[in-house]
Amino acid sequence: MSTAVRVAAKVQPAEQALIIFHGLGDSGSGWSFLADFLQKDPSFQHTKFIFPNAPTIPVTVNSGMRMPAWFDILEWSLSPSRADVEGTLRSLNVIQKYVQEQIDAGIKPENIIVGGFSQGAAISLASSMTLPVKVGGFVALSGFCCAPFEAFQSSSSKNLDTPIFHGHGDDDPVVPLQSGKAAKEFYTSKCGMQNYDFRVYRGLEHSTSPEEIFDLIEFIKNVFSMSRS
């Protein structure tokens, strides 16, 4: 399993876990600000945070340069038909191990949220089809579809009604809004996801924003409060 930046819950024992996967060329520390920010809110005093680091691999679209990546990107079209399925499946196995690690530590599956940004969002969405347990929710910020439907045909999803939050900027030059919309269409129409919240943020490029973070926090709170009811 990959290394990770880990932030313990302020109050023990931890009751919830948020696992966030970074984007291409980044590292787990690039998103650890989220833990610092959320832990200022008493609602998250029992939440632990895990920010895994991707392996360093050659990336085709960057002339084979080695960089942290969850899978190879063969072309900037981000078409599922030209996806690195083998690399994606390896990363889905990593996600499964992190989820199981939290369960083994005593966290209930419904108190686990899997999410990420860009590439990390793509594998988080894909994990909704392959995780062997039903988790609390999935988060995708600037996400896209990273594998064709055939890659999931042997899977029987446990998360068809699990809440998904997908935020996307309408001015994203790296993962265009259309790629985000295509992901929503793929996971709802083709895969059968029933609880997919897709939100568009005006003027947002390949990044996040205070408005998106606010909506994300509300989503996380709703998931964790639902799991306590």
Image: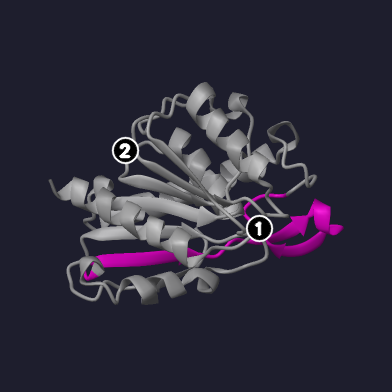
Give the residues drawn in magenta, as a range. 45-72
Coordinates of residue 13 in the picture (x, y in percent): 17, 68
Quick check: 153 left or right of 216?
right
In the image, what residue type sits under mark 2?
Lys
Q: Residue at x 59, y 63 (%)?
A: 207
**Residue 195 colored in magenta in the image:** no
Per the rendering, the mark at residue 164 is none
Tell me the amino acid under the disc marked 1: Ala
Check the image and name the residue furthest to the right. 63
Tell whether 105 sits left or right of 6: left
Horizontal relation, residue 85 to residue 38: left or right: right
Q: Earlier in the sequence, mark 2 or mark 1?
A: 1
The residue positioned 64% from the left and 45% from the top of the image is 177
Could you give the CA–CA distance between mark 2 and mark 1, rounded to whole angstroms? Answer: 26 Å
Q: Quadrant of residue 83?
A: top right
Q: Work out whether 203 lies above or below 136.
A: below
**Is residue 163 in view from this perspective?**
yes
Colour basis: one colour
Callout count: 2
Q: Residue 122, image x and y in percent? A: 57, 46
**Under tag 2, what secondary structure?**
loop
Q: Tag 2: Cα neighbours inside 10 Å, few (<14), some, or many (≥20)?
A: some
x and y percentages locating residue 61 in the rendered image: 82, 53
Disc 1 on helix, strand or loop? loop
Which residue lies under the disc numbered 1?
69
Q: Which residue is mark 2?
A: 134
Q: Residue at x 78, y 45 (%)?
A: 74
Which residue ends up furthest to the front in the rendered image? 202
